[in-house]
Amino acid sequence: MNDYIQKGTMDFRKANLALFAGAFSTFANLYMTQPVLPTLSKVFHISPATASLSLSLTTVALAISMLIVGSLSEAWGRKPIMTFSMIAVAILTLLIAFAPNYHMLLVLRIIQGVVFAGLPAIAMAYLGEEIEPASLGAAMGLYISGNSIGGLAGRIIMGTISDIFSWRIGMITIGVISLLVAIAFYFLLPASRHFKPEKLAFKPLVQSLVMHLKDPALLSLFGVGFLLMGSFVTMYNYIGFQLLAPPYSLSQTIVGWIFLIYLVGTFSSAWMGGLADNHGRYKILLSGIGLMFGGAALSLVGHLILKILGIAIFTFGFFGSHAIASGWVGRHATHDKAQASSLYLFFYYVGSSIGGTSGGIFWSKFGWGGVISIILIFLIVATVLTYMINQITSRNSAAQG
């Protein structure tokens, strides 16, 4: 009996709506502090680098937890962990809104980073188990769109409401929306039919991770993910500080809406992924990094329109490059591909944490030129690693041929 969820059925619509909403909620909460970093810096009398810890510590906690939560779900089930994650995230956001000081805010954000992992670490596994293969592409695409739209919406909601009322009201708004979404998720998502619980076994997980880290091509790809995301988060963490200050003196609302530039990534990831299939990953990944380099350099120009254009080009290049690098991991890994992808995401989010915070030191000492300098250094190293990956994979292909 074929009891997989098929396209066109009510269960398919429910599953897609639930996971889209789950991704939306997760990433709206994850990135909610990014547009208000200048506000947090001012309210709590802290440096920009310290303010960025509200995002950096959260993403590093998420990165570490993702390596573990996937294994826990093999024993405890997919839907229970995802539901718990979403409810806990919403409650923590409401608690963060009332944090009496910055230290408590950071503690709550670290805890939130741990529970965030419950959805992204498991959602793709659920889809792979429950959706019929012919319908999986559409379901996966909708889930991934929830990631980007959620991240975008969280930033815009926080930026706009913080400007009209306060950052605390902004967080309460996101928390209430997320709690309602979590309840809807529980009732909408069909129960697992193909999940088979297994005993918790961390030893095979560790052995698999070590094997992947011994592969020089994979290790280089992980490094590329680290550097790409480090560059990207650095750009968006500190552009708000630049645009709120003279000579631009933009409002918090307008700065929040600048995150609409993210939408170019929806196109570039699919377009550049197709180009990579036709012209090779190496050439197109280099092109994407080149676009990021050129866009970052253009953002040094003082004219606001050219600065925003530079950020748009940078963003276009980032999403395309990330799509190619993450896909290359799955293509190159010879075993335990899910673990290889988890490791890529681990380095990706650690890059977000380290790059995002170190960028604050450069901002404080050297201004926007300092921020762009660290981004350009990251991208030069990413270019070298990409060259190394191509050399290694070319040698391996020649040896097999």
Image: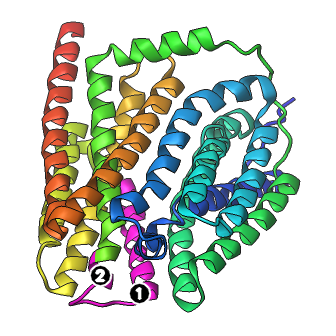
The three-letter amino acid code for the residue at tag 2 is: Leu
Between 255 and 187, the one nearer to me in the picture: 255
Residue 251 on image: x %, y %: 40, 90
Q: What element carries label 2?
A: helix
- Residue 3 lies left or right of residue 111; in this view the side is right
Membership of 248 in magenta stretch: yes
Q: Earlier in the sequence, mark 1 or mark 2?
A: 2
Which image quadrant for residue 18?
bottom right
Q: Is residue 20 magenta?
A: no
In the image, residue 277 lies at what x, y percent? 30, 41
Residue type at mark 1?
Ile
Task: Please give the count of numbered marks on the rendered protein.
Answer: 2
Q: Which of the numbered marks, if any, corresponds to residue 243?
A: 2
Q: Can residue 15 be seen in this view?
A: no
**Which span of residues is magenta-colored?**
242-271
Looking at the figure, which quarter contains the N terminus?
top right
State the residue at coordinates (26%, 19%).
Answer: 216
How would you rate the neighbour count of disc 2 (Cα within 10 Å): few for under 14, some for 14-19, many for 20 or more?
some
